[in-house]
Amino acid sequence: MNNSLRELVRNNPHLWSGDEVCQGKPGGIPTGHASLDAILPGGGWPKNAVVEMITPHWGTGELQLLLPLMKSMTRRRRWILWVCPPYIPYAPALVDADIDINFLMTIGPNIACRDALWTIEKALQSQRCGLLMAWLNHLPNGVIRRLQLAADAGKTPCVLFRNQRGKNSPAALQLQVNHSDRGIHARVLKARGAHQYHSADIPYPG
Amino acid sequence: MPRPLSALSFRVYQEQEACNKTETGKGTRTGQQALWLAVYLPKLALEVVAADQSDEVSVAVEEIKGRKLVHTASCSAERMGISAGMALSAAYACCPGLKVHRINEIAREERLDALAAWALQFSAVVSLHPPCSLLLEAGGSINYFGGLAAIRDTIARELTERWKHVFYQATTPTPTASLMLARAGCNLVVERGADLRSVLGPLSIEVLPLDDKRKQRLNKTGVRILRDLWRLPSDGLARRFGTELVTHLDQALGKLPEPLNAYRIPPRFSDTRECSFDIDEQQALVPVVRGLVTGLCDFLQKQDLYTMDYQVHFYHRQDPVTMLHIGLRRPIRQPGYLMMLVETQLGRAKLDAAVVRVTLTAERFYSVAPRTRCLFPGSGLEQQDQDIAPLLEQLSTRLGAAALKGIATHADHRPEYACRTGVPAAVGPAPPGNRRPLWLLPKPRELLNKDDGIYYRGRIHFLMGPERIEAGWWDSDGIRRDYYVGVDDIAGRVWIYHDLTTRQKWYLHGLLG
C-alpha cells in the first residue's frame, strides 16, 4: 500500500482496509475453538449482537461450539437463559463440561411465540444475563432487527438457533453448522465487518 | 373434676355474688390491676362441625392409629355415659342413635381466631390458647364497661346467643390460674392474688400440663389435688417432676411473670379508586393503578411489611369483574417494582368493557424480607444473584412460575433420573465419567432397525459402547439397556440404546449436540 492510500484510509473514517478486518481485529469474545476464531471477524463471537446458528436439525454440534462460552460466563457468575430449548438440557453433560448449572435457567418450551420473543427482548434489555440462547424457527427480519437492537442496548450476546436460513438477515453473524466426517463443519454465511466468508472444521472434543 | 364451690370457705364469689360485689365496690376499685378473664369452650370441636347439637346426642370423633375415638361428646351424650377418649363402638353401645361428626381442626382454629377478633372489643390484650381457650385482660376495661360483671354478662350473652357455645369463664389476677379454673369448669371471679392459693387448692391435678405418665406418678404419691402440691417442697418437686411443673405453679400464683402471645387481627390492605369517567384504554388505567400501588407501598412501609401477592380488580358497568392476580417470587415492597409487574400484566389483560372502578387488595404479608446470604461475602455471587431476581420476577409474572426452570443433577444411574428440572438449581453429585449427551429426549424415540444397520436420519455408525445401564426395580421403573455413542451421517453424534428387556429394540435417547 503506498503512502497516499494509507493517508486516505487514516484520515477518512468511512474507509478501511479489507484485509485488516478479515485477519480479525480483536474485539470478539473468544469461542474457545482456535479454528472457529480464525474465520470469525473480530476473532470470536461478536459482542452485544445477535448470532444466528443455522442447523438442518437440532443437536448437530451447534451447542458444542458454545460450551466454552457458557463455561466462561458461568465462571464469571453470569446467568444463561435458554428460551424454548427443543429437548432437555442434560445436567450431567453440562456439569461434565465444567459449566456451573446453578446459573442456567430454562424458559419454556411450552410458551407462545409472542411470549418467547417478549422474554428474549426483556432479558436482553435487562442486562442481567451473560448469554441468551433461543430455539425459534419463525423469525421475520423485523423481529431479528429488534432483538439486535435489544442486544446492543443491553450489551448481551444472543444466539438464535434456526433450521432454515433467512434471507438478508440483520443478524451480526450467520453461521451454518453441519455435521461432517471431520467433526463440526461451520461455515460463515454472513458476518458484519468481513468481506469474504470462510469455513472451518472443529473436531468433537473427547 | 371440680369440687363443689359451696365447699370453699374463701373470699371467692360465685357468679351472682360477684356481680353484686363489683358493682357495690366500684368506687374503691382502681381499675389498674390486671385481671385475666379466661374463656374455655369445652365443646368447641363438636360445635364447629355440628351446627345445632344442643339437644341431640352427637359426638365428634378423631382417628388415632386407625381407631375411631370420641373426641368431644355433646351434653346429652355425656348424660348417656359417653365420654371423651371412648372408642366409637363403645359409644354406639351406649346410644345406638348417636350422630357422629368427623373432627375438623381447621374449622376449629378458624373459629378460635374469629372469637379472638370478637373478644378484642372487650380488651386490647387477647391471647389464644389452643385448642379451645381464650384469654383476655379485663382489668383495664372495667371502668369503660361499668364493672367486671357487665363484661362477664356481655361475654356470656354473646357466646350463648350469637356463637351458641357452651363455655366456662374464670377471672383471676394471673393468666394461668384463670385458664386452670376455666378448664376445671368453674365460673368464678378471684380479685386478690392472695386468695389464689386457696381457690386453686381443690382443683384436680388433671388441669396441669403434664403427660399421663407423670400424672400417674403424682397419683401414686398420693397427690390428687393442687393443695397436696402446695404442701410439697418445691425443690424436690422440681427434681422429680421437672422444673416446668414448678414454674407453672408459680405462674398460677403470680410469683413468676407469664409472657403471652397477644392476638392481632391480620393486616389487610384494600383501596378503591373510582374513575371519573369510563376508561376503556389500558394505558389510561396506568395512572389509576399507580395511585393504588403507591398506597399499598405506603401501607407496607408504615407497617414494616412485605407482600408476595396482590390482586387488582377492575369493575365494569355491566360485565363481570376482571381480576389480575400478581404473584411474586419473593417478598418485596419497592413501588417501582410492584408497578412494573402490574403494567406487565395489564399489557396482556383483556378488558372487555370500560372500567369504572379499580380495587387493589393484599392479604398475605411477611414481616421480614427473606434474604439469602452468601457463604463467602464479597465473592460476587450475592450481587449477581440479586441482579437476576427482578428479571425472573418479571418473566414469571407474564409466563407463569412453571415456565421458568433451573436444572440440577440427581444421584441416579438411570439417565432419565439423573437430571431434574425445577426452581432450586442444586448441583448434585458429579456425573459418571462416561460420555453423556447435551440434549436428552424427553421420551426415547424408536429407531428404524434394518438388516444393514440402524437408521435415525441417516445410518448410524457406532463410536463407543456398549455401556450397560440397568436395574431400578425399587420404583417399578426398571431398565436394562446397552448404551452406545454413534454417529449419524446427517444428524451428527447420537446417544442410542438397545433395549434388552422385553422388546429388543433400538432407541434414540440423546443428542451430543
Image (spheres, grey):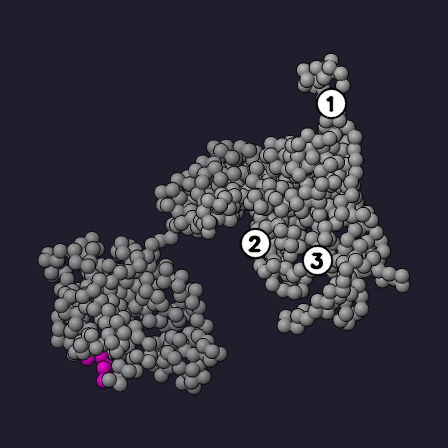
Answer with mark 3 or mark 2, whichever residue precedes in sequence.
2
* First to last magenta residue range: B222-228
Q: Chain of mark 2?
A: B
Q: CA distance from mark 2 to mark 1?
A: 49 Å
Quarter of the view holding residue B486: bottom right
Q: Which mark is residue B425?
A: 2
Q: Is residue B318 visible?
A: no
CB within 8 Å, label 3 to label 1: no
Under mark 2, the amino acid is Ala
Quarter of the view holding residue A4: top right
CB within 8 Å, label 2 to label 1: no
Query: Mark 2 or mark 1, which is nearer to you?
Result: 1
Farthest right residue in view: B451
Under mark 1, the amino acid is Ser
x 46%, y 49%: residue = B376
- Inspect the magenta stretch and tell me whether residue B224 lies in it: yes
Q: Are marks 3 and 2 on the same chain?
A: yes
- Percent across and percent down for residue B74 are 37, 75
Asked which secondary structure carries label 3, the reply is loop
Between residue A181 and residue B70, name the one nearer to us: A181
Q: Quadrant of the N terminus of chain B?
A: bottom left
Q: CA distance from mark 3 to mark 1?
A: 46 Å
Q: Is B383 left, or right, of B463 in this rendering?
A: left
- Percent across and percent down for residue B30 are 13, 56
- Percent across and percent down for residue B152 are 23, 62
Q: List the residue tagged with mark 3.
A: B435
- Percent across and percent down for residue B433 are 67, 60
CB within 8 Å, label 3 to label 2: no
Q: List the residue tagged with mark 1.
A: A17
Farthest front residue in view: A2
Between residue B46 and residue A93, name the one nearer to us: A93
